[in-house]
Amino acid sequence: MPVSKKVKSIPISGTLYISEIAKNMEKRGKRVLRLDIGDLNFPTPHHIVKAVNEAIERGMTHYSSSKGLRELREAIANKYNETYGIDLDPDKNVIITPGAKFALYAVLFSILEEKDEVLIPAPCWVSYEGIVRACGGEPRIIKTKGLDFRIDYESLTRVKIKRRVKALILNTPNNPTGRIYSLKELKEIRDFSEEEKIFVISDEVYDSIVFEGRHISMMELMDPKEKCIIVNSFSKKYAMTGWRLGYIIASEEIIQCVNRLLQQTISCVPPFIQWAGYVALTSEESKRFVKEMREELRRRRDILDSGLKSINGLTYRRPEATFYYFIRIPFDIPSLDFSKKLLMRYGIATVPGVFFGGYDNYIRISFGSVSIEEIMTFISEFSRALEEMQNAQNKTIS
Ligand SMILES: Cc1ncc(COP(=O)(O)O)c(C=O)c1O
């Protein structure tokens, strides 16, 4: 019996390919530097774990409203209202989802008709393309250039909208570049989306991991009650990737559509998990944790940066946010081949740039799950690998 064409059009996860090989090597006792992992090696703060254990004991083990616990929606609305001076209504403009990934799926499922197009400025997170396809849409990658990967009005309008473009997915701070989009870029996106009458879906899951500058939420420029859709989660902010907890902020109409989907699919996010989110958002200990984790990540970034600087001929920009570096491969080799060589010969796991919107001359490295010692080993091994690969290339040419 044939399975659906739609599901066959969903690409398999690019990050899994390398991580499967890395895991097998580790099982065989090989040392692997796991710079491929988009996760953090910080335990979820104890006060959150404790609060959840207590919530389970108290019997928070039944269905909640499909929109999510009122306390959590209110805490989210309050946080944004206080920060941005807006007036989100927790009953109309907020809904709880199992992570940001599913939030994106639910939003796209709610707005797309078959073959509607979605603009995705790249480099972009590996899953956007797949999620758009899973919802029957057509992803249209907009490649940005230069080491700053700037999005500008001209390049947006150059991608002439003849067909059925419905939305643009923005990701700031950005995975994989570690960039924060500037106010000017965001204004241009706003102007463009208003002229073309398309939704802006703003994925802001890294908003708390910022080392320099300021994260600007799309909410500062567009009213989420009408114009833009904000997707966020607890995964990266509180080292809670495995808990699967996220949320959407949007107009009442969008929230109602997403709610229908949740009612007929997941029913609700487990209430004790939602309670974890409430505790994470409202306790002072969480604020301290976020700050301490950010400082440790900054330390890793700085050490990595001075190491990378010492390698001749490398092109990259220092990320001001997230825990990723997007590095240009200094010679001519497809990124998947390069990543495989780095992994199998030198025990360095990275993610090929081709999966981030087709940047086949880049790799992404993550410093979310490595120690300072591992970073030092990476620098010396990476430097050796580049030298040896370069020599081998020179030999084949001459
Ligand atoms: C840009 C971006 N958006 C969304 C997600 C998914 O987050 P969640 O764990 O909340 O589903 C990730 C995870 O790596 C990400 O990098």
Image (cartoon, helix red, strand yellow):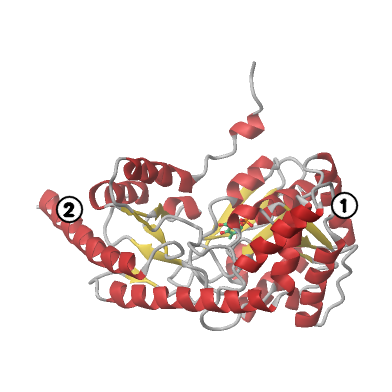
- Between the C-alphas of marks 2 and 1, the distance is 60 Å
Q: Which is more toward the observer, 83 or 361? A: 83
Give x and y (percent) for residue 368: 46, 64
**Residue tagged by mark 1?**
65
Is label 1 in a helix, a strand or a loop?
A: loop
Residue 203 appearing in the image:
no
Residue 320 is left or right of residue 6, and the answer is: left
User: How many neighbours does mark 1 have within 10 angstroms: few (below 14), some (14-19), or many (20 or more)?
Assistant: some
Q: Residue at x 74, y 78 (%)?
A: 220
**Residue tagged by mark 2?**
393
Q: Looking at mark 1, is its residue's CB closer than 8 Å to ligand 1?
A: no
Up the image or down, 9 lies above or below 226; here it is above
Give x and y (percent) for residue 229: 76, 63
Q: Quadrant of the N terminus?
A: top right
Q: Amino acid at mark 1?
A: Ser
User: How many neighbours does mark 2 have within 10 angstroms: few (below 14), some (14-19), or many (20 or more)?
Assistant: some
User: Which badge, 2 or 1, comes first in the chain's sequence?
Assistant: 1
